[in-house]
Image (tube, coloured by chain):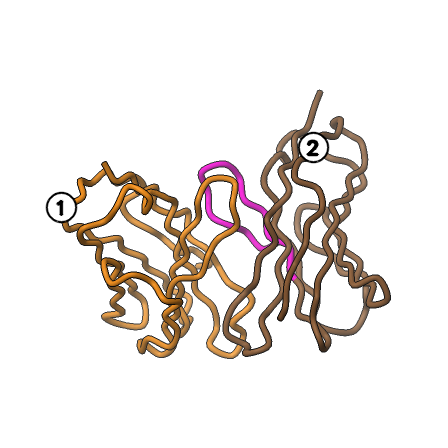
Chain colours: A orange, B brown
């Protein structure tokens, strides 16, 4: 199984809402990533988890809160977002020892109204 | 600092014609280089990678890429393009810290019949 799954596929939320994005992999990967991708742009790294611990936070605003409950699951909690946060949010995973060969999920298309 | 440049924003090729997508990198040591493809509304899929050894690497879907250190390039090629190859293509380099990928801005490939 080389699949990374993400739910939901689409999400529309108001600026005062709280929502969560979910990512799951069953490849035994111990590194997991959140990326943000705006239209016609490359993915931008947001967070990296290694062995369920946050190892990289690329100066992401606190309205984005990641969580890694176990080695297969990665969440991104959203609160008080701005319209400019509308984007495709991609999750990826990799072997801890091979951080570059990443397997990506299909993404969650987020719209903030 | 490492960087990746994809000089072509958009390329159109006829179905059955050959394809070459350009990628130039800036990196102090031997780079870890990748090509990813993204179909509309989807996540990224790894096409091929170069770490060391043979400078011509074969990937999935009939793609290949050649690493040329003297030109700091890692161009992607395919001898005969299919309509299903229409997508966004990203070249990436692994960062020196060994923690993340640095993506180029991407090249949009359109295939005409």
Horizontal arrangement in the rendering, residue B23 relative to residue A43 (left or right): right
Q: Residues within 10 Å of mark 1 (few under 14, many from 20)?
A: few
Where residue A60 sits, quadrant-wise, is bottom left
Q: Nearer the viewer, mark 2 or mark 1?
A: 1
- Spot occupied by residue B37 in the image (x, y as percentages of width and height): 59, 47
Across and down, in percent, residue B80 comes to 78, 36
> Residue furthest toward the right?
B70
Q: Give the residue pinned by disc 2.
A: B82
Q: Left or right: where does residue A2 sit relative to residue B101? A: left
Q: Position of residue B49 (x, y in %)?
A: 67, 62
Bounds of the magenta segment: B34-46
The secondary structure that dominates the magenta segment is strand
SS class, disc 2: loop
| Mark 1 lies on residue | A16
Report the Cα–Cα distance between label 2 and label 1: 46 Å
At a point 58% along the width and 55% down the height, the residue shown is B46
Q: Which mark is residue B80?
A: none
Q: Residue at x 39, y 70 (%)?
A: A48
User: Mark 2 packing: few (<14 Cα in 10 Å), some, or many (20+)?
Assistant: some
> Which quadrant of the figure has residue B101?
bottom right
Q: Secondary structure at mark 1?
A: loop
**Can you say whether B27 is above or below B105 in the image?**
below
Q: Please state, as top left, top right, bottom left or bottom right, where the C terminus of chain A lies in the image.
A: top left
Q: x, y (%) of residue B29?
A: 72, 77
**Residue A88 relative to residue B78: left or right:** left
The residue at the point 64 percent across, 63 percent down is B3
Task: Say if mark 2 contacts mark 1, CB within 8 Å.
Answer: no
């Amino acid at each position: 199984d080389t699949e990374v799954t993400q739910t939901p596929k689409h999400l529309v939320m108001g600026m005062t809402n709280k929502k969560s994005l979910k990512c799951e992999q069953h490849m035994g990967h111990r590194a997991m990533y959140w990326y943000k991708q705006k239209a016609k742009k490359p993915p931008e790294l947001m967070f990296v988890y290694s062995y369920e611990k946050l190892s990289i936070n690329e100066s992401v605003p606190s309205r984005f809160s990641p969580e890694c409950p176990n080695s297969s699951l990665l969440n991104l909690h959203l609160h008080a977002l701005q319209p400019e946060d509308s984007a495709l949010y991609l999750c990826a995973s990799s072997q801890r020892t091979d951080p570059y060969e990443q397997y990506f999920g299909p993404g969650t298309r987020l719209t903030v109204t | 600092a490492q960087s990746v440049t994809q000089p072509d924003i958009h390329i159109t090729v006829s179905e059955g014609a050959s394809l070459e997508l350009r990628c130039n990198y800036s990196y102090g040591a031997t780079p870890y280089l990748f090509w990813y493809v993204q179909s509309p509304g989807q996540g990224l899929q790894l096409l091929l990678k170069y770490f060391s050894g043979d400078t011509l690497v074969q990937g999935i879907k009939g793609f290949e890429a050649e690493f040329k250190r003297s030109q700091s390039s890692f161009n992607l090629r395919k001898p005969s393009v299919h309509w299903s190859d229409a997508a966004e293509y990203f070249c990436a380099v692994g960062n020196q810290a060994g923690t993340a990928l640095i993506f180029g801005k991407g090249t949009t490939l359109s295939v005409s019949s």
